[in-house]
Image: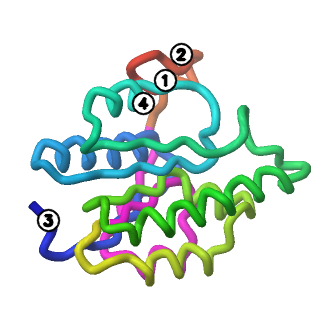
């Protein structure tokens, strides 16, 4: 089964749930025998629950982690930018490969926000999207030009978050 038409979706905002929404879409698609690739920008270390699930759902679900271990070095982004640029080349190749019905660029908006990828590069990725591939872009602070280019934009708005009450990230919920 292939999509008749692929759209561009953006999940952005300061609230929790952007990656979770994209992974929910991936799960729904895999249930319909669609092939999904998730390329994670700036998530270079740690095995999250979605990686374990992808192993069980392979070959329909593929997750590729990119980025350096730890968080972006905001005082010197040179190495982070190099890794993100390499990931972007990989994303372009995989998007156009014909192997996937849905292609998710997780945290690509964050990579733009940190200056690791230029917004024009994301717009070019959108322009290169094959007609029958759904492209999903996640991360905080989606650039206005990316929002304009998208077919669907959802903003996650934090109203209340248990982190502020001292509850840390939990296995199986946030990781």
Q: Which stretch did the figure color magenta?
A: 135-159
**Mark 2 sits on what residue?**
167
Which residue: 28% across, 73% down?
7
Question: Distance from label 3 to label 1 (Cα)?
Answer: 40 Å
Which residue: 55% across, 41% down?
65
**Mark 1 sits on what residue?**
162
The quadrant of the image that shows the N terminus is: bottom left
Q: Is disc 1 surrounded by few (<14), some (14 to 19) or many (20+) residues within 10 Å?
A: few
**Sequence order check, earlier mark of 4 and 3:** 3
- Give 107 or 101, whichever is nearer the viewer: 101
Question: Distance from label 1 to label 4 (Cα)?
Answer: 24 Å
Q: Secondary structure at mark 3?
A: loop
Question: Distance from label 4 to label 3 (Cα)?
Answer: 24 Å
Which residue: 71% across, 33% down?
69
**Sequence order check, earlier mark of 2 and 4:** 4
Question: Distance from label 1 to label 2 (Cα)?
Answer: 6 Å
Tell me residue 111's x, y (percent): 64, 57
**Sequence order check, earlier mark of 3 and 1:** 3
């Amino acid at each position: 089964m292939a999509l008749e038409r692929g759209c561009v979706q953006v999940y952005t905002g300061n609230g929790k749930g952007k990656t979770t929404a994209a992974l929910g879409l991936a799960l729904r698609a895999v249930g319909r025998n669609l092939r999904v690739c998730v390329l994670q920008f700036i998530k270079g270390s740690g095995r999250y629950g979605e990686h374990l699930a992808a192993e069980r759902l392979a070959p329909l679900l593929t997750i590729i982690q990119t980025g350096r271990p730890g968080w972006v070095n905001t005082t010197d982004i040179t190495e982070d930018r190099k890794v993100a640029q390499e990931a972007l080349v990989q994303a372009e190749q995989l998007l156009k490969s014909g192997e996937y019905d849905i292609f998710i660029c997780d945290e690509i908006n964050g990579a733009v926000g940190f200056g690791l990828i230029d917004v024009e590069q994301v717009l070019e990725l959108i322009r290169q999207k094959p007609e029958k591939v759904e492209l999903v872009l996640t991360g905080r602070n989606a650039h206005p030009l990316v929002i304009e280019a998208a077919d669907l934009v959802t903003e996650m708005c934090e109203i209340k978050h248990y982190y502020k009450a001292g509850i840390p990230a939990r296995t199986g919920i946030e990781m």
